[in-house]
Image: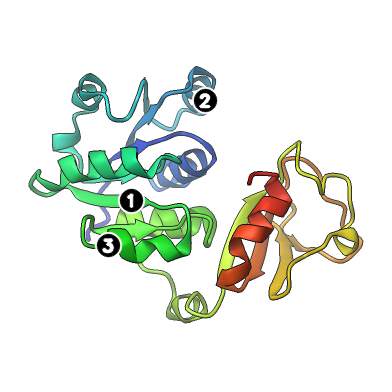
Amino acid sequence: MSNDALQIVLLGGGHVGYYTAEQLAKQGHNLTIIERDQTRCDLLLEAGFGTVLHGEAVDPEILGNADIASADVIAGLTDDIGSNLAVCLVASKMEGVRTVLRVDSPSARDEYEEFVDQVIFPEGLGALATVSAITGGSLPDAVNELTGIIDLLQIQVTEDAPVVEKAIRDIAVPDGCSIVVDMDEKMVVNPATTLKPGMKLLVATEPTASREIVEILTGNQ
């Protein structure tokens, strides 16, 4: 793929969509972001990543306004696999449009690979893997080999997570899982590191423990 700017439509401007849009905008790509929550739309507009459309990703009028037929890539990044897949299936019938589908667990990849060009579990390597999938780039071979053994998750601690204001040593981290890096401070954490709301952490985990550590750090079941 050339280094020319891509026309990219992102479905969803939540945490995954926001950080993906941030990285894509830094690379100079042209973005249209569809987001149903007005507050998130306001944040995206303030950030200036590109065109922001308020509405449902599956709304034909919204998709028309996004001009998906002229896009190079459609990336379904909402937390609703059904909506992501529906739009990707529509886009897959359009010539020259590449489709990227977000799923909610590593085990779901195989279920959807036949329907889209690429399936991603964005918590694995966070925005890095998502941007790479969208732009058609590749991760270093060493990382590709590594992700066959473990998942590298970028997880943001939420305000209502049960671990807030606790030191890592006081958290029941699952076996086969390790909290490695504070992404904001760009430093390796230690057992005394206290977890604060909004902290973005890089976590290395065996695939079987991925969902459990996400629940622990976010409070989401």
- Looking at the image, the residue that sits furthest to the front is 221
Q: Which residue is painted at 52% across and 29% down in the image? A: 47
Q: Position of residue 73 (x, y in %)?
A: 25, 46
Q: Which residue is painted at 44% across and 65% down in the image? A: 107
Is the residue 83 above or below the residue 64 in the image?
A: below
Q: Which residue is painted at 37% across and 45% down in the image? A: 81
Q: Amino acid at mark 3?
A: Glu
The alpha-carbon separation of the residues under discs 2 and 3 comes to: 29 Å
**Looking at the image, which is closer to me, 189 or 220?**
220
Query: In the rendered image, which residue does mark 3 sit on?
Result: 113
97 to the left or right of 148 = left
Are circles 2 and 3 on residues that touch, CB within 8 Å? Answer: no
Q: Position of residue 143 (x, y in %)?
A: 49, 75
Q: Residues within 10 Å of mark 2 (few under 14, many from 20)?
A: some
Query: In the rendered image, which residue does mark 2 sit on?
Result: 40
Q: Amino acid at mark 1?
A: Leu
114 to the left or right of 157 = left
Q: Earlier in the sequence, mark 2 or mark 3?
A: 2
The alpha-carbon separation of the residues under discs 2 and 1 comes to: 21 Å
Q: Position of residue 89 (x, y in %)?
A: 19, 45
Q: Nearer the viewer, mark 2 or mark 3?
A: 3
191 to the left or right of 95 = right
Residue 84 seen in the figure: yes
